Image (cartoon, rainbow, N blue to C red):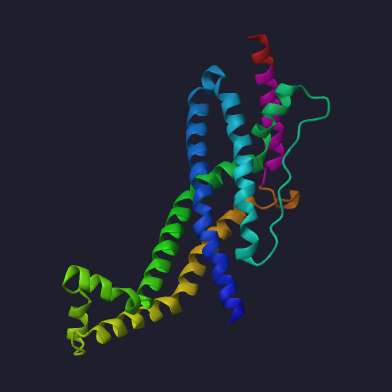
Amino acid sequence: MKTIFKQLGADSAYLLSSFPIALPAFIITVAGFAAGLGTAVVWIGVPILAATLFAMRGLAAAGRSQLSAVLRQPVNRPHYQRAPEGASALRRYLTPLTDGQSWLNLLWGLVNFPLAVAGFCVALSWWVATVAALAYPLYAWVIHRSVGEGDGLEYATRWLGWGDSYAALSLLAVLGGLVMALLLPLVLRGFAITQAALGRGLLASLTESDAPYGGPTRAVSLDTEVTRVQERLSAA
């Protein structure tokens, strides 16, 4: 029982706190990638893309730090590619363009957002509805006295043959709250594990043996392209 409550707290905290991280990550991803790609033809977009990838490292680190409590296992920090020693400032600045993990961070910022929105809305609304239903007998009388009429719950109690007394209304509300409370850990766990699994797949460390086919070759190709960009910017 203690483990269930502990995991419920971890899942709830993750779903409610991941949205403030996912929102800026999505904005930076979409705005930065669109601006960089749209102006890449005049080479202005290259440093914009590099700045976007740099910015996403911090947000990806924040998202990665949340995963261990949900997945119940440590999540390793990836190793970003670094420029060679003695490289120019421009070379170091453009290095993220050759790093596969930096692009995975960008992909995470895009695909994680809808999951974060859904998880946040479900967690918040389910918690509020559960607490409101369980606490119904404590506050509903104020609403009835202020409004001078029922809140609609009496239609359900009449249909059940319970009448429309305050006790019947309270009993139905509390029973509904208990059902929602029992389902709360399962629902939030499903949303949390789905979002966390996606985060682990995109943000966790990627060893050389796990790298996609053609990864090293692609890195060399991108490194060559960065060198060409440096030469053209220097010439300009």
Foreground residue among 124 and 78 = 124
Foreground residue among 6 and 201 = 6
Where, by quadrant of the figure, is residue 44 drawn?
top right
Instruction: Establish if 119 lies above or below 108.
Output: below
Going 65% across and 20% down the picture, which residue do you hit?
Answer: 229
Residue 31 lies, in percent from the top left, at 48, 33
Instruction: Establish if 50 lies above or below 228.
Output: below
- Could you tell whether 165 is left or right of 138 in the image? left
Where, by quadrant of the figure, is residue 149 drawn?
bottom left
* Quarter the C terminus occupies: top right
The chief SS type of the magenta part is helix
Q: Is residue 226 magenta?
A: yes
Going 46% across and 59% down the picture, which residue do you hit?
Answer: 119
Foreground residue among 130 and 59 = 130
Looking at the image, the residue that sits furthest to the bottom is: 161
Residue 151 in sight: no
Looking at the image, the residue that sits furthest to the top is: 236
Looking at the image, the residue that sits furthest to the right is: 85
Residue 1 lies, in percent from the top left, at 58, 82
Residue 107 lies, in percent from the top left, at 55, 44
Tell me which segment is drawn in magenta.
213-230
Going 55% across and 47% down the picture, which residue do you hit?
Answer: 108
- Could you tell whether 174 is left or right of 88 in the image? left
